[in-house]
Image (cartoon, helix red, strand yellow):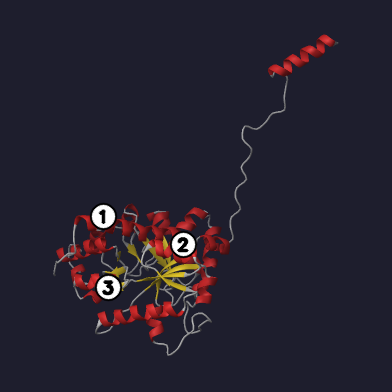
Amino acid sequence: MADLQGEVTALAEVGELDQPARPANPPTVPAPTPDPHTLLARHPVADGYCGLPETLRTLPWHDLELGETSVESDLPRLRAGGTGALLWALDAAEEDPLTAVLEQIDLINNVVARYPEGLRLARSASETADARAHGRIAVVIGPAPAAATGDSLGTLRALHTLGLRVLTISGASWAECEQGLTRFGEEVVREMNRLGMLVDLTGAERATAARALAVSKAPALFTRSGARALNHHPDNVPDDLLSELGERKGLCLVPCSAARTGPELRDVADHLDHVRDVAGPESVGLSGMYDTGDAHPEGLGDAAGYPALIAELQSRGWPEDDLALLTWGNVQRVLRVAEFTARAARQRRGPSTATP
């Protein structure tokens, strides 16, 4: 009996007795999907087009902090929708576009100063991130139409000094030629690269957009464009251009616009799906187009609607990483790359003296 017990002990020591099977690696429990509000608290929306400057110019009085029924993106709605940054668009449809843009920049500075607990002006990616870290909504000035520059690179530089960070080039005389851009137009794009100002291609002809993408060393963007394959609005982007945009790490900000995307929330989601599939998850973002006069899809009538859109995308299988790029990461990357490009460009060249 003692010999048998000794043999069992010896076998156990060399591992030759049957042991219960142990899994090589414990099963991984997938992280729970955050609800839309939690996700937006982690990755707030950087909204690519807000028309508040022109809207506020028409109001005799407003209170964005208390809540303003005359607008679609007051502070309570922005907070409810999880917005962390806004590009405030400037309108220059008047006879004197430069004066109109200057007055709106002045208004933006005054509005931001009036609501220091809600808004903070941001001129760079780091300032945008800092505003978010302090619980403020970052305000980035732009896009503005190229007409405001008067075909003057000096005026372009002055507007940049005042905080303008995005310029829409469609409609400019130097962006309306057979090859897309004139030689002066190409110089405008290079000067924008040197300044760190983003090129907005919304509404540009196919040749203009393609040439601007080829010339620009920084990512370009469409601030309010859906997919032309789903909706034939002239500002929407065809698939071949979306593919090119994705290759160059540019950005298409899909709008909450009934005319550009469709009358339902799911239509906006369809455009987001399509742009992500064609251009890639690093080239798609959001553009509310609130306070622009545009009609909005049902369920996205004001800036508080973004959680519902995120819930729809989650139901379609969007992972958190892609949603984080969609809401915040892609806009932040484009701003930062534009700054890096500008630093490198300034080492190679000084301010351009080109004229049309």
Q: Does residue 63 lie above or below 210 as drawn?
A: below
- Residue 342 lies left or right of residue 77; in this view the side is left
Q: Are marks 2 and 1 in contact (CB under 8 Å)?
A: no
User: Total label count?
Assistant: 3
Residue visible at 57% across and 61% down?
38
- Judging by the rendered image, the residue that carries numbered circle 2 is 327
Q: Earlier in the sequence, mark 2 or mark 1?
A: 2
Q: Which mark is residue 344?
A: 1
Where in the figure is residue 21, as x and y percent of width and height? 69, 28
- Judging by the rendered image, the residue that carries numbered circle 3 is 159
Q: Earlier in the sequence, mark 3 or mark 1?
A: 3
Rendered image quadrant of residue 155: bottom left
Q: Quadrant of the C terminus?
A: bottom left
Q: In this rendering, which labeled residue sits more in front, label 2 or label 1?
A: 1
- Label 3 sits on a secondary structure element that is helix
Where in the figure is residue 63, as x and y percent of width and height? 49, 84
